Image (cartoon, helix red, strand yellow):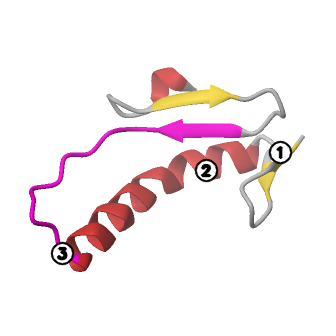
Amino acid sequence: MPALTPPGWRLLLRADHSVEVTTKAEIVLPVSAISLVTEVTVFLLGLTPYLTVLEEEGVTSTAFGKEKI
């Protein structure tokens, strides 16, 4: 799946079988709450198709981000 993710995104399978997604974003200071919420929203919207693929493969998550394998 890492070959399918956008440049700069990193996927890790952790020891407890949870999946960790990391990336970096630059935000111009001073930052407002609206800017922060916008950045998080854009990231989550971009993440949605990858979560769908994981779900189709049988990886589900709980509210705390732990995947059940």
* Cα distance in 3D space between marks 1 and 3: 38 Å
Where is residue 2? Give x, y as percent. 52, 24
Q: Is the N terminus in the top left, top right, bottom left or bottom right quadrant?
A: top right
Task: Please tell me whether residue 16 belongs to the stretch shown in magenta.
Answer: no
Q: Secondary structure at mark 2?
A: helix
Q: Quadrant of residue 23?
A: top left
* Cα distance in 3D space between marks 1 and 2: 11 Å
Q: Which residue is mark 1?
A: 58
Nearer the observer: mark 3 or 2; the answer is 3
Q: Residues within 10 Å of mark 1 (few under 14, many from 20)?
A: few
Q: How many marks?
A: 3
Taking 36 as reference, is 22 above or below it?
Answer: above
Q: Is residue 40 left or right of residue 19?
A: left
Q: Which residue is mark 2?
A: 51
Q: Which residue is mark 3?
A: 32
Q: Is the C terminus in the top left, top right, bottom left or bottom right quadrant?
A: top right
* Cα distance in 3D space between marks 3 and 2: 28 Å
Residue sticking out furthest to the bottom: 34
Where is residue 54? Give x, y as percent. 69, 43
Q: Quadrant of residue 6?
A: top left
Look at the image and give the residue range highlighted in magenta: 19-32
Nearer the observer: mark 1 or 3; the answer is 3
Taking 59 as reference, is 13 above or below it?
Answer: above
Q: Residue at x 34, y 29 (%)?
A: 8
